[in-house]
Amino acid sequence: METAVACDGKLTGCNPPTVLNAGDSTWFMWDGRADRLWNQALLPLLNPVEMNSNASLLLARLSAEYEEEYRAIFGKLPSEETDDNQLLAHFGKAIAAYERALSTATTLHSTRTSSASCRRWRSARRRRTRPTWD
């Protein structure tokens, strides 16, 4: 079985789990090593096999391309961050906010189904059972 390819062409060892409905989860990654969505967002970024990045590279990228967006969200420029961990946490939380929006409950298909049907599906998903369609 082929696995995901990292930025430099190496194989990562596993395929990434989907981010669809990730906001509904309590544990992340296949082995559950992340317990927060924002933390899960940082793992591929910092992994030496996957993206091989760090806070300095992230700071340079955010400063070059997303300075005003960063200020609008966090109230300061990326270059004004004095703590690498705070910069990483802010970045992870921004990615997590995006991932929370990736919900199958907000797809075009679901907008055409009845709200009762959607409630049954969400309830079944929470119980990890198949929904009943009466």
Image: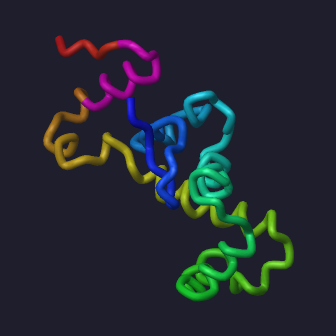
The residue positioned farthest toward the left in the image shown: 112
x 32%, y 41%: residue:
104
x%, y% of residue 30?
55, 30
* 29 or 10, nearer to the observer: 10
Most common SS among magenta residues: helix
Seen in the image, is 83 located left or right of residue 54? right
Quadrant placement of the N terminus: top left
Q: Is any part of residue 71 visible from this angle? A: yes
x 25%, y 47%: residue:
107
Range of residues picked out in magenta: 118-129
Q: Is any part of residue 38 visible from this angle? A: no
Dividing the picture into quadrants, the one containing residue 113 is: top left
Work out whether 69 lies above or below 125.
below
Seen in the image, is 21 located left or right of residue 92? left
* 89 or 75, nearer to the observer: 89
Work out whether 70 lies above or below 26.
below
Seen in the image, is 20 located left or right of residue 97? left
x%, y% of residue 103?
37, 45
The residue positioned farthest toward the right in the image shown: 82
x%, y% of residue 116?
24, 28
Is-magenta flag for residue 66? no
Quadrant placement of the C terminus: top left
* 90 or 113, nearer to the observer: 90
